[in-house]
Image: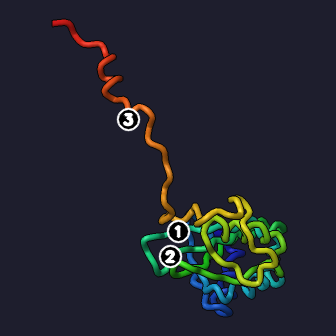
């Protein structure tokens, strides 16, 4: 982890009770959903993180507490720093506030969180599906989403296939 990130992690920990850690030399912090907007503002205004590079989620089902982690990747382009914030969410109907007011490019990312994971983003100006059809039922990237599949074609005629196999002559 770069030494320049330590003051940033300390600020997140003292202001929001974030739990800093490191994974594969990548700095990260875990914080509660109610602090994500203020934390994003702090990163942008006080520490120069001027880009929300990525926003996604991870489903840990059948675990329920937390069921999901929303993962934010912030970048400070001037100092070439990267920081990951994780927001754990419990239950089957998770919610978290929108960060669009701080990082406007979060718009489509947050719509994708709703569409794929069913994470309701409060205060979002246009929360609707972005990848799936509007009448789709369910959220396909949840681990408890039912898998739809077709039977493999040759499973219906395995006897016919078996008869066509070459057999050793007696």
Label for residue 127?
none
Secondary structure beneath disc 1?
strand
- Tell us which disc is closer to us: 3 or 1: 3
- What residue sits right under mark 3 in the picture? 155
Sequence-first tag of 2 and 3 = 2
Label for residue 67?
2
The Cα atoms of the two marked residues, 3 and 1, are separated by 33 Å
Count of labels shown?
Answer: 3
Residue 162: name its quadrant. top left
Secondary structure beneath disc 2?
loop
Label for residue 59?
1
> Which of the two residues, 134 or 81, is positioned nearer the viewer here?
134
Q: Position of residue 5 (x, y in %)?
A: 69, 76
Identify which residue is drawn at 79% across, 84% down.
41
Q: Is residue 18 in view?
A: yes
Identify which residue is drawn at 83% across, 81% down.
101
Residue 152: name its quadrant. top left
Q: Position of residue 87 (x, y in %)?
A: 61, 79
> Which of the two residues, 169 or 5, is positioned nearer the viewer here?
169
Query: Crowding at label 2, few (<14), some or many (≥20) Cα neighbours within 10 Å?
Result: some
Identify which residue is drawn at 65% across, 67% down.
56
Identify which residue is drawn at 70% across, 59% down.
133
> Which of the two residues, 124 or 133, is positioned nearer the viewer here?
133
Q: Are marks 1 and 2 in contact (CB under 8 Å)?
A: yes
- Left or right? Give the position of 9 relative to 158: right
The Cα atoms of the two marked residues, 2 and 3, are separated by 37 Å
- Left or right? Give the position of 140 relative to 50: left
Q: Position of residue 74 (x, y in %)?
A: 73, 71
Sequence-first tag of 1 and 2 = 1
Sequence-first tag of 3 and 1 = 1
């Amino acid at each position: 982890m770069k030494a320049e990130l330590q003051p940033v992690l300390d600020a997140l920990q003292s202001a929001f009770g974030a739990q800093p850690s490191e994974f594969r030399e990548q700095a990260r912090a875990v914080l509660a959903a109610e602090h994500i907007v203020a934390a994003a503002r702090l990163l942008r205004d006080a520490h120069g993180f001027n880009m929300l590079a990525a926003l996604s989620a991870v489903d840990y089902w059948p675990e329920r507490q937390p069921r999901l982690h929303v993962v934010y990747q912030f970048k400070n382009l001037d100092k070439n720093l990267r920081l990951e914030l994780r927001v754990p969410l419990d239950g089957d109907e998770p919610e978290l506030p929108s960060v669009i007011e701080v990082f406007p490019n979060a718009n489509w990312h947050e719509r994708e969180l709703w569409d794929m994971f069913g994470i309701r983003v409060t205060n979002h100006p246009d929360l609707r599906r972005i990848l799936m059809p509007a009448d789709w039922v369910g959220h396909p990237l949840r681990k408890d989403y039912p898998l739809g599949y077709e039977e493999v074609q040759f499973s219906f005629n395995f006897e016919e296939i078996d008869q066509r196999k070459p057999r050793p002559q007696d």
